[in-house]
Image: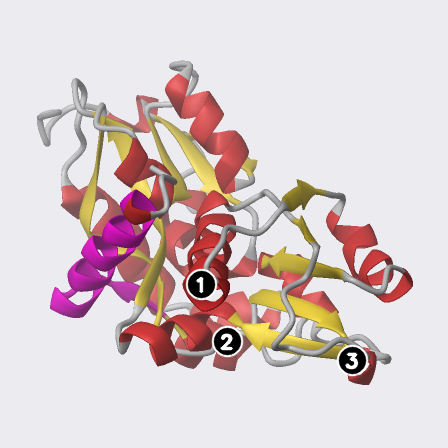
Amino acid sequence: MIPAQQNLVQVRLGLVQHLNAHPLTFGFRQQKELQLFDDTPARLFEMLSSGELDAALISSVECLRNPNFGYCKTVGVCCNGALRSILYFKSKEQDWTIPAQKIYTDNGSRSSVALLQVLFANKFGRLPSVLPENPEKIGDRVLSEGTAGGLLIGDAALRFSMREDLDQFRVKDLGEWWLQQESLPFVFALWAYPKSAPLEDSYFEESLATGLKNLDGIAARSDFPFALEYISQLLHYRLGPGEWAALERFQDHLRAWDLL
């Protein structure tokens, strides 16, 4: 365990750019001495794996897949139902009961892609064909290709939810879909670090505590008019028994579909 008295400003931290992570990272962003790196959870996982970072907020699925990682046991990015920022969609002409032939995915969050694979496979009895695509192009590709689906995450999904032509799509919120299937919350991201150089949970809790005191300010700096509701009601950031049960259930599904 890194001792509490160590000068933790030397730690290299990977922070997620999306609004959903800002309450967790707010305290760290106030410490100008820290070495902070902003990117997607997928890219931060690669940096953490290669030793470029000491800790990072990464997709929960990568914590389940990588036994060499430890992670904070008390805080993360969680939801308990619809959260508006993990969206699966098809054009309105498509029938929900017929599986999409392919799904264009924003691979910035591997938890979201894995969650969609699990939910899709449990419904249709097979894994979907997923293809990475530029998030800005996914909506239009789904409209132009009559049998494709799309997956958007984070800020790209929030922007999609504000499209003027949203009525041209059928949309499923993955947080709500998971809750309907499992009656459990879901954990999308966790603070991870190498097991050989762990950090105390309190280090991450303190940053969140600062963020929770500043939700109004975080929301005010956002481009989304619903930002405060999003970070204060649709999302939550503390892990309890329900979140741990959800991670275990998710791991069971991943193992069943050979996705670990």
Instruction: Identify which amino acid the numbered label 3 is placed on.
Output: Lys
Q: Which mark is residue 230?
A: 2
Q: Which mark is residue 119?
A: 1
- The residue drawn where x is 29% and y is 55% is 250
Q: Position of residue 122 (x, y in %)?
A: 41, 63
Instruction: Identify which amino acid the numbered label 2 is placed on.
Output: Tyr
Q: Where is 255 relative to 13, above or below?
A: below
Label 3 packing within 10 angstroms: few (<14), some (14-19), many (20+): some
Q: Nearest to the eye among marks 1 and 2: give it.
A: 1
Mark 2 vs 3: CB contact within 8 A: no
Q: Is residue 170 left or right of residue 52?
A: right
Please tell me whether residue 16 belongs to the stretch shown in magenta.
no
Instruction: Find disc 3 in the rendering and name its residue.
Output: 92
Q: Is residue 7 left or right of residue 112?
A: left
Label 1 packing within 10 angstroms: few (<14), some (14-19), many (20+): some
Give the total of numbered labels.
3
Q: Which mark is residue 66?
A: none
- Mark 2 vs mark 3, CA separation in Å: 26 Å
Mark 2 or 3 closer to N-term? 3
Quadrant housing the N terminus: top left
- The residue drawn where x is 69% and y is 75% is 161
- Mark 3 vs mark 1, CA separation in Å: 20 Å
205 and 73: which is toward the camera? 73
Q: Which residues are magenta?
A: 236-255
